[in-house]
Every structure is written in structure tokens, then in C-alpha cells.
Amino acid sequence: MAKEEVTRLFRYAQANVSLREKLNSAPNIETFVQLAQDLGYNFTVEEWKEVTSFSVEELKSKVSEIPGI
């Protein structure tokens, strides 16, 4: 389920500039996941890390450039 939710968020963020900017402004992974949860995406910090194989802090690119999704 988490993989589908992360993929759904990624695809929607690619198409929605304001959402992408909001998510990209998250200062840490906890805030990022909370923003996603507030928008109806159901995954945890641990699930995000598992699905993406990295944390937001390790990522040098933006959420719109996440590889593998």
C-alpha cells in the first residue's frame, strides 16, 4: 500500500506545481510526511524511506525528480 501511495503522491506532485513547491519546502522528512498525510497520502516516514531507499535529508534533488517512481 505504501508504495502505491508514494507513487501517487509523486505523480500528482509532477503535475501540480503548487503541491511540488509545498512539499519541496519541507525542512525535514517528518514535516514532508506530515504534509503528505494532511493531503490524504497514507504512508509513514519509515515507509517513505523503504519505498524510496533514501531520506529527504539525503536527497539533493527535488521531490519532482525522485528516481525509481
Image: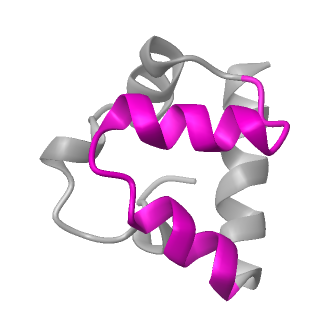
Nearest the eye: 27 or 41: 27
Nearest the eye: 35 or 58: 35
* Residue 2, position as x, y percentages in the image: 70, 22
Based on the displayed image, in which of its 4 quarters is residue 14 positioned? bottom right
The residue lying at 79 percent from left, 50 percent from top is 8
Tell whether 36 sits left or right of 38. Answer: left
Q: Is residue 8 above or below residue 15?
A: above
Tell whether 31 sits left or right of 59. Answer: right
* Residue 20, position as x, y percentages in the image: 58, 73
The residue lying at 73 percent from left, 65 percent from top is 11
In magenta segment, residue 33: yes
* Residue 48, position as x, y percentages in the image: 49, 28
Based on the displayed image, in which of its 4 quarters is residue 16 positioned? bottom right
Q: Which residues are magenta?
A: 17-42
Nearest the eye: 8 or 33: 33
The residue lying at 71 percent from left, 52 percent from top is 9
Residue furthest toward the right?
40
